Amino acid sequence: MKTSELFSLNWNDVLKGLYTAIGGAVVSTIMTSVNAGNFSPSWTAIWHGAIIGAVSYLSKNFFTPAKIVTPTE
């Protein structure tokens, strides 16, 4: 399987970016809430964290040259 070319993104990048962004934002917000001594996650903080995570992940993939990935069994 070949990853996306340099300066381009494919659907696999977008889906992995969304997964990474949402997961990271949820975990980060929950941990901040728990460390503050209560459990009341803020949806605004989750949304902002997800946007930052998605932009970071997609930017990284946009500037990374293509590689051939061989899945292991």
Image (cartoon, helix red, strand yellow):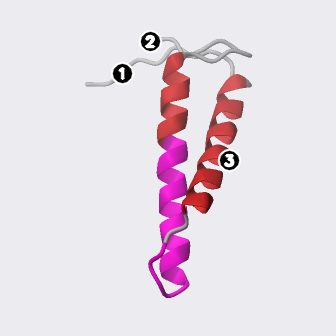
Element type where label 3 sits in the image: helix
- For the N terminus, the image quarter is top left
Give the extent of the magenta segment.
20-40
- Asked whether 67 falls inside the magenta stretch, the response is no
Task: Give the residue at x 47% y 18%.
Answer: 69
Amino acid under label 2? Met
> Foreground residue, 2 or 28?
28
Left or right: 41 as drawn, with respect to 64: left
Amino acid under disc 3: Ile
Q: Nearer the viewer, residue 22 or 44?
A: 44
Q: Which residue in the structure is indicated by mark 1? A: 71
First reached walking from the N terminus: tag 2 or tag 3? 2
Q: Secondary structure at mark 2?
A: loop
Amino acid beneath label 1: Pro
Q: Quadrant of the C terminus?
A: top left
Mark 1: which secondary structure?
A: loop
Q: At x 52% / y 53%, what residue is drawn?
A: 24
Distance from label 1 to label 3 (Cα)? 29 Å
State whether residue 41 is above or below residue 38.
Answer: above
Query: Taking 7 as reference, is 19 above or below it?
Result: below
1 or 3: tag closer to the N-terminus = 3
**Looking at the picture, how far across and down is residue 28, in whole percent?**
54, 63
Disc 2: which residue: 1
Q: CA distance from mark 2 to mark 3?
A: 28 Å
Q: Which residue is mark 3?
A: 52
Residue at the far bottom: name it. Answer: 37
Residue 43: percent from the left, percent from the top? Answer: 54, 60
Percent position of residue 26, x then y? 49, 58
Label 1 or label 3, whichever lies nearer to me, is 3
